Amino acid sequence: MSGAVFVAIAASIGNLLQGWDNATIAGAVLYIKKEFNLQSEPTVEGLIVAMSLIGATIITTFSGPVSDWIGRRPMLILSSVLYFCSSLIMLWSPNVYVLLLARLVDGFGIGLAVTLVPLYISETAPPEIRGLLNTLPQFSGSGGMFLSYCMVFGMSLLPSPDWRIMLGVLAVPSLFFFGLTVFYLPESPRWLVSKGRMAEAKKVLQKLRSKDDVSGEMALLVEGLEVGGDTSIEEYIIGPATEPADDHDADGDKEQITLYGPEEGQSWIARPSKGPSMLGSVLSLASRHGSMVNQSVPLMDPIVTLFGSVHENMPQAGGSMRSTLFPNFGSMFSVTDQHTKNEQWDEENLHRDDEEYASDGAGGDYEDNVHSPLLSRQTTSAEGKDIAHHGHRGSSLSMRRPSLLGEGGEGVNSTGIGGGWQLAWKWSEREGEDGKKEGGFKRIYLHQEGVPGSRRGSIVSLPGGGDVPEGGEFIHAAALVSQPALYSKDLTERRMSGPAMIHPSEAAAKGPSWKDLFEPGVRRALLVGVGIQILQQFAGINGVLYYTPQILEQAGVAVLLSNLGLSSASASILISSLTTLLMLPSIGLAMRLMDLSGRRFLLLGTLPILIASLVILVVSNVVDLGTVPHAALSTVSVVIYFCCFVMGFGPIPNILCAEIFPTRVRGLCIAICALTFWIGDIIVTYSLPVMLNAIGLAGVFGIYAVVCLISFVFVFLKVPETKGMPLEVITEFFAVGAKQAAAKA
C-alpha cells in the first residue's frame, strides 16, 4: 500500500497550498488596506479576498470534463504552475489591479486542486484505506493554514510588515508541488484504462499496490467503464473446482455453474441457493434482516438501506487488499491446473492500426501487451456453450498471467477487488429468434453472506445446499449479476469475433455525454453530491471562520492577548493560528475513523455537536452571562465547532463526491458538485455582512444551526455508507437502488 499512500500525500500538497493561501490573505489584507487606502472602499477589499473564489468557480466549470479528456495528472501539474505564477505576480503587484489579476490566477490553481485531488486519490487508493487517504487534503489544508498563520504572525511583529513577501512566499511550496506532480505522480489507472492504455495502467497499479499480480483490479477497471443495465441479485453456494470439470456429468447437476476469475486457470463451482439473502431481500424491500428496520422510516432512500445491509454483513470490510470476505479462497484459486498462455488472441485486436494501442505493445513485451480484450479466444462462439455444459478447464477470461504464489506457497487472491469483494464471470445462454442458442458472459460482483462454512456439515443446512459435494470449503454468497463492459450494446452491434470483443474503451473514448447524467443511478448520486455540498456551505463554516477574531474579541479573548503587548492585528492572527492548530488532532482522529466507523457515522455523530455549539453561540450573544462565562462559552464553542466540522462535514462531502459516480462521467459530475461548492461559498461569503447588519451575529448563528439540523435529516435519509467498497461496486449499487426505488414509486 506504500505506493498509494505516498502518491496521496504528494497530491494533497495542492490542498496545503490552498490552506496556505487562505490564511495568508486573511492576514495580509490588514496591511494591504493601509497601503492602498482601502478603508473607505470595502468593495475593493472584499474583491481582493474573493477574487480567488471567482477564479476557482470559473476554472471548475471546465476542470472535470477537461480532466476526462486529457487526464488527471496534467491538470494537477497545471494547478501547481498557476499557484507558482500567481505567487510571483502577487510578489510584484505595483497596484490593486495587478493584485486582483494575481488573485484570479491563484483561484484557478485552487479550483483545480480542490476539485481534482479528491478525485485523483479516490481513483488511485485501495478501497480499504480510501477514506483515510482522502482525508489527507483536509489535514494538509489545515496544516497549510497553521504554517501560514505562523509565518504571518512572525512577520506581523516586524516594524514594517511587507504583505507582498507574505503572499510571495507561496512560490516556495508551489514549486515543490510542481516537482512532485511532474516527477512523482502517475496518471490515474482508471483514466488510463478508459483510454485503452492498458499496459500503462497495469504498471501504475503494480507500483501503487506494490505487487505484480493486479489482474483482478485491472479487470475491475475495465468493468467500471460500464454500469450494468439489467442487474439482478442471485444467491450462490460456491466451492472450489477441485476436480476436472470435464469428468462431471453435466446432466447429473444441471444447476451447477462454473464461474471464472480474471486470470487464466481460475475457476470455481457455484450452484444457485434458495436461501435468504441480505442483498436480495433488501432489494425486494421485504426482509426479516436487521437493516430492513430502516424501511419503516418514512422517506428513507432504499439505497441507504441497501448499502447499510452490505456493511452489516461484512464484519471486516476495512481489512487487507486480499479478501477477508473469502478467507478460504486463496488456496482455492490455485487448485485448478495452471495453463500455458494461449497466444490465439483476437486477430482483430492483434492487427489493429490504432496508435495508442500500438504504443502499449511497443517492444513486443508479451506480458505487458494487455490492450487486447480480457476475453481470450480460447473458444469460438459455437464452442462457448461447452464452457457451461462441459466445464472448459481454465478461464475464458484472462489477463495473460498464471496465478502467482505468495511466500510460503499461499495462493494470491487476484480476483479480490478490495473491501472483501470478488469479481467473476459466468457463461449464460438464451434461445434466439431463429431458435439457435446464443451465449454471452455475465459480470458478477460476489459478496459473502454470513460466516464462512467449512465442508459439508456447515453448508448442508443452508437452503439449496444439501447437494453440495463433500470436500473443500463452501460459502453462501450474494452475486450482483449484470452485463459486462465487454458486452455492452454499443460494442455487440459493432464487431464481434467469438467471445473476444474490441476493447470497451473504443466506445468510451468519445467521452461523457450529458444524457449520461440522466441515468437513474447517476441522477440519484448527483442528488446526494450536490445536496451535501450545498448544505456544507450553508452550515456556517465560512461565517465562523471569517469572523472568529470578531467573535473571540467580543468574548474578551483578543483584548486579553492585546494586553500581553501584541497589536490588534497580531492578536487576531495568533488566535486564528491557535484555533487552526487545534483542528489537526481532530482531523487525525477522523482519518483513523473514516474507514472503520465510516463516512455516514462521522456525519451523523458530528452534526449534532455542530448544532449544539451554534446554539451555545446564539445564547452567549443574546443572554448577558457576564464577561468570564461569555468569554469561556464563546471560545469553547468556536473551538468545538471547528474541530467537529473538520472531522465530518469538512472532508466527507468531497470524499463522497469522488466515490459515487461512474468512471465515464466522474470528472463531469465532480465538476458539477465542485461548482455547487464554490457558488455556495461565494453566496455565503458575500451575504454575511448583509445578514450581520440585518439580524446580528446571534441571528446568523441561528440560521446556521437550522441548516445543520436539515443536514442531519438529509444525511440520515439520503446518504449511504461507502466505506471499504470498490468504486465500481458503489456505482453499481446506486444504479440498482435507484431503479428499485423508481419501481417502488
Image (cartoon, rainbow, N blue to C red):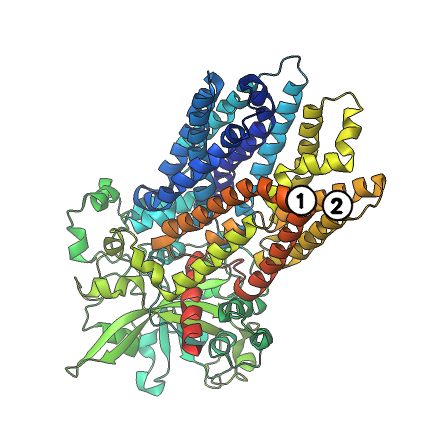
What residue lies at 44% left-to-right and 50% top-to-bottom?
Answer: 673
Q: Position of residue 314 (x, y in %)?
A: 56, 66
Q: Position of residue 67 (x, y in %)?
A: 35, 43
Neighbour tally class for label 2: few under 14, some 14-19, many 20 plus, Cα within 10 Å = many
Which kind of residue does numbered mark 2 sit on?
Asn
Point out the image quarter for the C terminus. Answer: bottom left
Q: Is residue 597 visible?
A: no
Quarter of image, res 145: top right
Residue at image x 37%, y 47%? 189
In x, y percent, where is residue 350?
A: 18, 52
The reply to whether the C-beta atoms of the residues labelled 1 and 2 are less than 8 Å apart is yes
User: Vertical placement of 601 versus 658: above or below?
Assistant: below
Between 453 and 516, the one nearer to me in the picture: 516
List the residue tagged with mark 1: 696
- Mark nearer the viewer, 1 or 2: 1
The front one of 427 and 93 is 93
How would you rate the neighbour count of disc 1 (Cα within 10 Å): few for under 14, some for 14-19, many for 20 or more? Answer: some
Q: Which residue is mark 2?
A: 621
Residue 621 image position (x, y, % from top left): 75, 45
At numbered mark 2, what does the secondary structure look like: helix, strand or loop? helix
- Hey, which residue is sitting farthest top in the picture? 159
What kind of element bears circle 1?
Answer: helix
